[in-house]
Image (cartoon, rainbow, N blue to C red):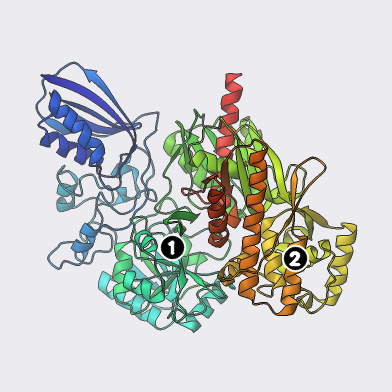
């Protein structure tokens, strides 16, 4: 008995070889019909024997192409048309777009084999790709995803590439970036002082010689430019830091293969799997004591960010070099990554000695992603290339909103058709250039999905550029503006990622550096009872004065003095932060603390980490965010000195974690010469134990046994591990962020979830 079905498939099903996959299944099961793309995803009509249709349906979900992902599949019965042939139809345009855009992914093994096969026509071609690999998000200009809607539209295919492109059984069927040396993009080297070098082999030779000589090159990649130099050359690293204006912040290092990675750092099986994954992120791993890398790669930091090549050009370049390469974002510190050749020749001129260029345009900038491994799984630090714009299904019906994110590590989030699309990493919103990059990126995503937000969502902080932009945009468009508290948004991000429906509030532990509180002070050591509708501040770190506002962040010794003052401990020169603070500044700080002049109270856990790092002599001044905390984590040993935070109740019944006893004991141990590694370990344990005690108390008060963790402090795996293990031992279910960063890079997801929830509730009233 024959039947005819119509199948509608949504998810990542365009640009990933899904239509030829369907075509092959239809041939296998001798079915007639057709398959095509439209703005909603993929539509399929198939007819044939009922048993064959059932087998087709089962194989459709069980044998997906490597990059495909199905979110929804519906089947409808249709009248028979008695078709026996199966075809692939041209894409259909649509005013409504819900098809998901695939992310850029690293070159696949099949393409690598061709890259190194002298008999293959793409032998050593720097832009080899197929439907299973290569650029996607960074070249897409419109949906449906067809070549005419990408930056490859300016490269007409030669007859051989065209034949592969139109062959449903080819690995390159409708691979939109398909190209070869005859018809595709090309590379060349532009020297800062001298002529350009053309031709693949001559260019690769020239740039490898330049890098071996200790010079710096700008290398155009998938989502923008990198600045590259020899990662073992002290002088090259010093020169790069001087030119880029980057004093201590670590650089990422690209290594040829896992063997080289293991020569540099301890690589677990899970870290190795992440390094070789198709996303090819930067993975933070612990260096060997005898690592061959220059100390200038990650000064004072036991961890280094390693990544493997992810484009054919990277492979060819590293083949010609004996040593790993620093590969850091192609920009001046604080500016967006450069993506255009002319822009790079201008903006990067003060930084580099030459440019390795190509003529495939980049439409959307996309920095490298950064991850750590925690409990065998991914712990995102920066979610960008390889992951963006993979969508998160919201656990409730959601209208379209645009959430503008935070000030640091900015991303934005657009909700559409029940999904949250978190943007690529934009950067720290501290200048006009980054704000402009934000505006372009959000306009592009809105245009791709033809999404018109029903509301704008932003942080409460009045000085955030993202808040000010949202306020201006709301005034200009008449859209409602929804402002949400920073830590409530962090909690909502965890709930949304884990599909929590909001029916029951959870205990939320949110630890970070800075978040504008509802009382106008700076929060950051918070335990909330939260759902999508509201939150209550159930516990918090005892506030201390933040002298000079955000300027204090750069001087951990100021935070140490604030904690010593709050604990009633004299400022004697025998503790490092007092010795580091000039006497005249000490007098000013003391007056500020006593009078409250030009100070704001802060409950920030990030600032407590800074204070302890300064107190034990780790870091008195920082040159990048969280530097003191990162170094403190790295120094923590296995043997922990026992410390404790006091827990008391405030006038309103909220619990207050008072670090005064801990600060008092640490100061005494510093004077007594207790090893720094033991003090650092004891501090981490004390924070974890205090938070577990608070959660126990809140559960006893009837607030359930689910704990959600968020905030930038949870990038600290030492603390995260101690807290997660301890909470589980006490019978709690713990929600940890795995899809978006716990830092402010994931904040926009929570903002969007809160904004969409409020719109939904208002509509239901």
Asked if one can make out residue 414 in the rendered structure from this viewpoint, the answer is: yes
Q: Determine whether, in the image, residue 712 is placed left or right of residue 122.
A: right
Query: Where does label 2 land, which residue?
Result: 663
**Can you say which quadrant of the picture contains the C terminus?**
top right
- Spatial separation of the CA atoms under disc 1 and disc 2: 34 Å
Q: Determine whether, in the image, residue 190 is placed left or right of residue 590.
A: left
What is the secondary structure assignment of the residue under circle 1? strand
The crowding category of the residue bearing disc 1, from other C-alpha atoms within 10 Å (few below 14, some 14 to 19, many at least 20), is: many
Q: Which mark, by number, is residue 319?
A: none
Residue 748 is situated, as x and y percent measured from the top left of the image, at 56, 44
For marks 1 and 2, the one nearer the N-term is 1
Residue 230 is situated, as x and y percent measured from the top left of the image, at 42, 78
Residue 329 is situated, as x and y percent measured from the top left of the image, at 48, 64
Q: From this viewpoint, which residue is outermost toward the top?
A: 79
- Residue sitting at x 43%, y 48%: 388
Q: Nearer the viewer, residue 368 or 541?
A: 541
Asked if one can make out residue 433 in the rendered structure from this viewpoint, the answer is: no
Q: Determine whether, in the image, residue 348 is placed left or right of residue 626.
A: left
- Badges 1 and 2: C-beta atoms under 8 Å apart? no
Residue 459 is situated, as x and y percent measured from the top left of the image, at 65, 43
What is the secondary structure assignment of the residue under circle 2? helix
Q: Nearer the viewer, residue 519 or 449?
A: 519
Q: Is the residue 533 above or below the residue 485 in the image?
A: above
User: Which picture quadrant has residue 492?
Assistant: top right
Query: Where does label 1 land, which residue?
Result: 283
Q: Nearer the viewer, residue 322 or 700?
A: 700
Q: Is the residue 668 above or below the residue 65 in the image?
A: below
The crowding category of the residue bearing disc 2, from other C-alpha atoms within 10 Å (few below 14, some 14 to 19, many at least 20), is: many
Q: Determine whether, in the image, residue 167 is placed left or right of residue 289.
A: left
Q: Nearer the viewer, mark 1 or mark 2?
A: 2
User: Which picture quadrant has residue 277?
Assistant: bottom left
């Amino acid at each position: 008995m024959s039947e005819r079905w119509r199948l509608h498939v949504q998810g990542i099903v365009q640009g990933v070889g899904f239509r030829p996959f369907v075509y092959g299944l239809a041939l296998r099961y001798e079915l007639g019909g057709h398959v095509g793309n439209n703005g909603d995803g993929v539509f399929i009509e198939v007819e044939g024997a009922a048993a064959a249709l059932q087998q087709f349906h089962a194989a459709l979900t069980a044998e997906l192409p490597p990059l495909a992902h199905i979110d929804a599949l519906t089947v409808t019965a249709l009248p028979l048309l008695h078709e026996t042939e199966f075809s692939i139809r041209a894409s259909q345009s649509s005013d409504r777009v819900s098809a998901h855009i695939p992310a850029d992914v690293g070159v696949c093994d099949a393409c690598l084999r061709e890259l190194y096969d002298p008999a293959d026509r793409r032998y050593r071609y720097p832009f080899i790709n197929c439907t299973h690999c290569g650029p996607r998000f960074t070249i897409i200009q419109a949906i449906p995803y067809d070549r005419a809607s990408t930056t490859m539209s300016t490269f007409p295919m030669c007859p051989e590439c065209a034949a592969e492109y139109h062959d449903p059984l080819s690995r390159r069927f409708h691979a939109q970036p398909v190209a070869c040396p005859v018809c595709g993009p090309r590379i060349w080297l532009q020297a800062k002082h001298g002529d350009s070098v053309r031709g693949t082999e001559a260019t690769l030779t020239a740039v490898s010689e330049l890098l071996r000589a200790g010079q710096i090159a700008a290398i155009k990649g998938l989502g923008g430019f990198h600045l590259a130099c020899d990662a073992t050359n002290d002088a090259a690293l010093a020169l790069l830091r001087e030119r880029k204006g980057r004093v201590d912040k670590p650089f990422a290092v690209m290594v040829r293969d896992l063997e080289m990675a293991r020569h540099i750092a301890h690589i677990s099986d899970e870290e190795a799997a992440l390094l070789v994954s198709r996303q090819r992120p930067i993975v933070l791993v612990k260096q060997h004591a005898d690592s061959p890398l220059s100390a200038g790669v990650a000064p004072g930091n036991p961890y280094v960010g390693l990544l493997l090549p992810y484009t054919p050009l990277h492979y060819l370049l590293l083949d010609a070099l004996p040593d790993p390469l620093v590969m850091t974002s192609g920009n001046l510190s604080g500016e967006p990554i450069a993506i255009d050749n002319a822009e790079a020749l201008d903006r990067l001129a003060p930084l580099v000695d030459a440019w390795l260029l190509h003529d495939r345009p980049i439409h959307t900038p996309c920095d490298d992603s950064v991850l750590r491994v925690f409990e065998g799984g991914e712990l995102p630090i920066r979610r960008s290339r390889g992951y963006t714009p993979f969508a998160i299904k919201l656990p409730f019906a959601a209208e379209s909103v645009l959430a503008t994110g935070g000030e640091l590590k900015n991303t934005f989030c657009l909700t559409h058709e029940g999904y949250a699309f978190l943007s690529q990493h934009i950067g720290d919103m501290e200048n006009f250039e980054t704000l402009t990059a934000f505006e372009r990126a959000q306009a592009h995503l809105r245009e791709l999905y033809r999404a018109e937000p029903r509301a704008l969502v932003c942080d409460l902080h009045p000085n955030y550029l993202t808040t000010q932009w949202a306020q201006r945009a709301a005034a200009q468009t008449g859209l409602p503006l929804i402002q949400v508290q920073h830590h409530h948004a962090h909690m909502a991000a965890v709930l949304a990622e884990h599909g929590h429906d909001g029916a029951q509030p959870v205990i939320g532990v949110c630890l970070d550096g800075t978040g504008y509180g509802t009382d106008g002070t700076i929060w950051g050591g918070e335990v909330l009872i939260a759902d999508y509708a509201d939150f209550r501040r159930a516990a918090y770190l005892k506030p201390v004065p933040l002298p000079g506002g955000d300027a204090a962040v750069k001087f951990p010794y100021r935070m140490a003095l604030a904690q010593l003052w709050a604990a009633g401990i004299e400022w004697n020169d025998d503790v490092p932060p007092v010795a580091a603070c000039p006497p005249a500044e000490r007098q000013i700080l003391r007056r500020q603390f006593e009078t409250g002049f030009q100070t704001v109270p802060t409950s920030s856990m990030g600032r407590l980490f800074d204070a302890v790092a300064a107190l034990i002599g780790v870091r008195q001044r920082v040159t990048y965010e969280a530097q003191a905390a990162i170094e403190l984590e790295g120094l923590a040993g296995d043997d922990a000195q026992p410390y404790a935070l006091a827990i008391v109740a405030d006038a309103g019944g909220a619990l207050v974690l008072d670090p005064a006893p801990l600060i008092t004991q640490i100061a005494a141990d510093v004077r007594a010469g207790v090893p720094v590694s033991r003090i650092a370990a004891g501090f981490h344990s004390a924070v974890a134990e205090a938070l577990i005690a608070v959660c126990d108390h809140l559960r006893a008060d009837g607030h359930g046994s689910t704990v959600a963790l968020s905030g930038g402090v949870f990038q600290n795996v030492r603390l995260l591990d101690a807290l997660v293990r301890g909470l589980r031992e006490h019978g709690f279910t713990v929600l940890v962020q795995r899809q978006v960063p716990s830092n402010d890079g994931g904040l926009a997801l929570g903002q969007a979830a809160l904004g969409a929830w409020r719109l939904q509730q208002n509509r239901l009233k």
